[in-house]
Amino acid sequence: MNKTRYAKPLLLSLLAVFILAPACTGRAEAAWFSSRAEAGAKKNAENAALAEEKQLPRVEVEIVKRLTKIEQGISTTSTLKAYEEVIVTPKVTGRIASISAVKGDRIDIDDLLMILDSRNQEAEYASLQAQVAVSKAELEQAKVTLADAKREFDRYTRLRKSGYATQQEYDTRSTTYQSAVAAQAKSAAQVKQAEANLNAQAVLLSEYQLKAPIGGVVLDDYDLTIGALLNTTSSAMRLGRIDKLKANVDIPERDMGRLRLGMDALLTFEALPGETFYGTVTLIDPYVNTSTRTVGAEITVDNQATGYRLRPGMFARVLLVEASEENPLVIPSEALRDDGTVVVVREGKAVIQPVKVGVARGNVVAISEGLTVGEAVVTSGGNNLKSGTEVDVTSTSGASVTAPGAARGSAASAPASADAEKPAGEKQTKGAK
């Protein structure tokens, strides 16, 4: 009876435990997971802060290269011209009868270019030839008359001395002789005059044949056709000597002291990319142009040596060479710092490297001491770097640089072959040297 009375409350207590236990367990688990999440977030924040603290400075690099040659000097521009150029203009008026040369033809001096209609002048020439023939015949007749008069005069001279001729007869023969002498002289003069007229007509007739005053190329024929009328102000053809070409340049007055006769000139053309042509300064003006404050100079280029690849009218970029170096090591000019040093990346770390600078041209500087082929020099992001600073490298030339730790993503090494560092596609063509 007593066991039953105590058993029922015990059963109710156990049932309450079983009902309340899952609820307590769920609250404990939720608290545990909440603390884990907070710890993970804190850890991530700490890792992010640590990573931010260890972020490497990013730099851009270029590889030290070797060129075959580099030049330094005065840069300017010019337009090529024929070494000699002339416009052929007729001295007479006439219609074109024939054309012997057209635009682009190569011609030698005195080659026939064009003939104008000269039939009237040819007829006049024939008439003058006849006049010369008549004058010569009259001269021969005068010579015969003079010979007869001289014989009579000589005979009467002897007769007068012997007393067989009167003074009047002697005087008559003397007068006849003197007249014959004068007539012969007049006929001889008439022959000379007729021949002079004939020669003048021959010269005039030759003007109807237009010939080349220089050798070279027909630069322009002005699209003239047979039958076109030309006069003394008409342009018939434009000729130019192009075995040599000239380029006139204007140098600022402040640089006139750098000019000298015989200095080399490098010429490049947009029409011939990747090629360089040589010329020589052959003339320097002895005065300063007061309008532009410049000094003129003339560069001569041997176009025959180029295979006549250059043409008058081509636009040229010109470098008047003051200094040059053979097979130099070069770096971009932006890699050179104001204190004469460069930043080199070695094993992923920045190294401040003093260098000795040589010839500079454009955005390239020659380095004679301090660097070797294949090294990576910083071109951007290295102003505030110190030696030993680890860097994150990107290459603007497409080459990659070795850095410590594969986890940082750097790979491969710079090329070491000197041949690989020579600029591709660059070609040099000799001109006048």
Image: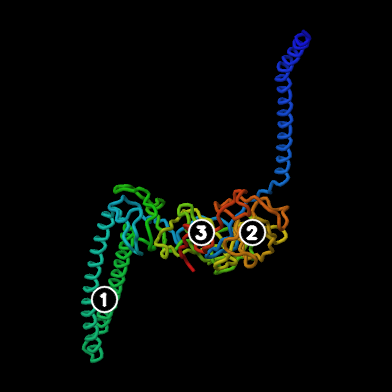
In this image, 330 relative to 176: left or right? right
- Of the pair 117 and 361, the residue shown nearer to us: 361
Determine whether the residue tagged by mark 1 lies in a helix, strand or loop. Answer: helix
Q: Which residue is mark 3?
A: 423
Count of marks placed on residues? 3
Marks 2 and 1 in Cβ contact (< 8 Å):
no
* Residue type pointed to by label 1: Ala
The mark that comes first in sequence, 3 or 2, is 2
* Residue type pointed to by label 2: Arg
Place residue 291 in its image quadrant. Answer: bottom right
- Of the pair 248 and 289, the residue shown nearer to us: 248
How many residues crowd mark 2 within 10 Å: few (<14), some (14–19), many (20+)? Answer: some
How many residues crowd mark 3 within 10 Å: few (<14), some (14–19), many (20+)? Answer: few
Q: Is residue 290 visible?
A: no
Residue 298, percent from left and from top: 53, 62
Q: Which residue is mark 2?
A: 346
Marks 3 and 2 in Cβ contact (< 8 Å):
no
Determine whether the residue tagged by mark 3 lies in a helix, strand or loop. Answer: loop
Q: Residue at x 72, y 28 (%)?
A: 34
Q: Residue at x 72, y 43 (%)?
A: 50
Q: Which residue is mark 1?
A: 180
Disc 3 versus disc 1: nearer the observer: 3
Measured in 3D between alpha carbons, the distance from the residue under mark 3 to the one under mark 1, in whole angstroms, is 94 Å
In this image, 119 relative to 380: left or right? left
The mark that comes first in sequence, 2 or 1, is 1
